[in-house]
Image (cartoon, rainbow, N blue to C red):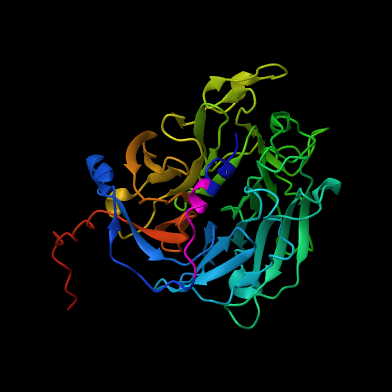
């Protein structure tokens, strides 16, 4: 039916850890047996704890900046130092304007740092507000910009509202991810608002991937290369459509390809892949299709051009997909080119070999009470996963690095 209202409160009912993370532990969690059975030798090591409902992980993108920024659903962003310590004072606290109480899928959901953050200090957040189209128990979607203060671990509280998206009188399917693409434009992915027709309706921004230009703008402009700038009855912000509740999308750090994970309804979860040279305009199929399967074709046109997912799994294996990243780190060379994903309810993990789109099932890789909610990628390409159930962050632990080979040539000696 939706993303994490299906499961989050059952796991949160067990109680979340509180307090400051005390540092890096060395216990690699199981079942890594399942990963080893896949021939990959993958596990997850606890990196930080003491967080409250972490739903997103971001980094500034500055190579020398080792800090992690964790989004807490209630409206705070916390800094995690490289030794796993959580800084007590939030980087940003906007819980007074974030509507996280009305429904479990609502709150502060996404964070992206400006590509020029080192110079302008800008970052962008995606949250539900209290406007709710006249219903105080609802919340519209708000994209806003903030700026860091002279203290690098604390942001200023001045909000610049960039884009407001009315949300139907339903409280779920908010989407919430946002990322800057290789082209420097800001991409964001609102859900369909639990009205499936929104995904194919081009006059609304729900159920879409949006692409806007915020560089040097007070709010935003439409990139001239967006696919629908000259199309009547289509919002020009739209880059792609046909999504139900896209819970995390990413760009391959090496190739620039885009991966979008979309939460299904009754039967299937899916991953979509688009090439780096895409000119936009893709239709990912919802509500005409759920995964690769017909759902409702009434009113659907040009179904032959809709994007077929590269991977799907049915609800016997999980019910709420969490999209991740293609591994491009240096620590584990044999994992290069594998796209990571998980399921929030079943705790199952998979990787997809991007060379051939072949998936490898890794099984349940986090312990009791854990629920993966988001992945993160640091500037070096190493991967992390957030556990909303226990308020923890884990770092990917892979196979032993490939040994350095002895040079087979004789170096030239200058005389």
Q: Vertically, is 352 above or below 306?
A: below
Residue at left offset 71%, top offset 64%: 145
Of all residues shown, which one is farthest toward the right? 134
Q: In this rendered view, identify the residue nearer to me: 47 or 8.
A: 8
Of all residues shown, which one is farthest toward the front? 14
Q: Position of residue 274 (x, y in %)?
A: 53, 38
Position of 313 compared to 240: left or right? left
Residue 74 lies in the magenta stretch: no
Residue 17 lies in the magenta stretch: yes
Q: In this rendered view, identify the residue nearer to me: 14 or 285.
A: 14
Residue at left offset 45%, top offset 57%: 390
Q: Quadrant of the C terminus?
A: bottom left
Q: Vertically, is 240 above or below 256?
A: above
Tally of numbered discs: 0
Q: What range is drawn magenta here?
A: 10-18
Of all residues shown, which one is farthest toward the top? 298
Q: To which quarter of the image does residue 353 belong?
A: top left
Q: Position of residue 407 (x, y in %)?
A: 16, 62
Q: In this rendered view, identify the residue nearer to me: 174 or 382.
A: 174
Q: Position of residue 237 (x, y in %)?
A: 74, 44
Position of 23 compared to 138: left or right? left
Residue at left offset 67%, top offset 55%: 100
Q: In this rendered view, identify the residue nearer to me: 318 or 402.
A: 318
Main SS, magenta residues = loop
Q: Quadrant of the N terminus?
A: top right
The reply to whether residue 356 is visible in this rendering is no
The reply to whether residue 123 is visible in this rendering is yes
Residue at left offset 23%, top offset 58%: 401
Q: Position of residue 112 (x, y in %)?
A: 60, 60
């Amino acid at each position: 039916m939706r993303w994490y209202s299906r499961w989050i409160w059952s796991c949160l009912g067990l109680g979340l850890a509180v307090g400051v993370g005390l540092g890096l532990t060395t216990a690699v969690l199981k079942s890594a047996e399942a990963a080893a059975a896949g021939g990959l030798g993958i596990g997850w090591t606890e990196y930080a704890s003491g967080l409250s409902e972490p739903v997103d992980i971001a980094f500034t993108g500055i190579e020398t900046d080792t800090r992690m920024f964790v989004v807490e659903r209630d409206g705070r962003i916390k800094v995690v130092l490289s030794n796993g310590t959580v800084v007590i004072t939030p980087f940003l606290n906007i819980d007074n304007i974030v509507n996280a109480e009305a429904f479990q899928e609502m709150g502060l959901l996404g964070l992206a740092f400006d590509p020029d953050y080192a110079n302008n200090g800008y970052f962008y957040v995606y949250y539900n507000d209290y406007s709710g189209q006249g219903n105080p128990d609802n919340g519209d979607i708000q994209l806003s910009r903030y700026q860091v203060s002279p203290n690098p671990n604390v942001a200023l509280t001045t909000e610049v509202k960039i884009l407001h998206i009315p949300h139907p009188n339903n409280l779920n399917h908010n989407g919430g991810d946002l990322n800057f693409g290789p082209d420097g434009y800001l991409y964001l992915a609102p859900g369909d608002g639990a009205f499936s027709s929104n995904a194919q309706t081009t006059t609304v921004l729900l159920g879409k991937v949006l692409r806007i230009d915020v560089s040097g703008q007070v709010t935003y402009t439409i990139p001239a290369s967006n696919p629908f700038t000259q199309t009547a009855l289509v919002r020009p912000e739209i880059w792609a459509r046909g999504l139900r509740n896209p819970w995390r999308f990413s760009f391959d750090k090496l190739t620039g390809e885009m991966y979008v994970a979309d939460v299904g309804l009754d039967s299937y979860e899916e991953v979509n892949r688009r090439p780096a040279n895409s000119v936009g305009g893709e239709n990912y199929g919802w509500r005409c299709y759920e995964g690769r399967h017909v759902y409702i074709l009434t009113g659907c046109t040009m179904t032959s051009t809709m994007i077929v997912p590269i991977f799907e799994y049915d609800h016997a294996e999980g019910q709420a997909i969490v999209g991740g990243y293609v591994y491009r780190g240096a620590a584990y060379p044999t994992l290069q080119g594998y796209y990571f994903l998980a399921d929030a309810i079943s705790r199952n993990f998979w990787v997809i070999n991007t060379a051939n789109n072949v998936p490898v099932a890794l099984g349940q890789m986090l312990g009791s009470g854990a629920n993966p909610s988001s992945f993160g990628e640091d500037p070096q390409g190493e991967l992390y996963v957030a556990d909303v159930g226990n308020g923890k962050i884990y770092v990917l632990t892979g196979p032993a690095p490939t040994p350095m080979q002895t040079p087979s040539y004789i170096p030239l000696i200058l005389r």
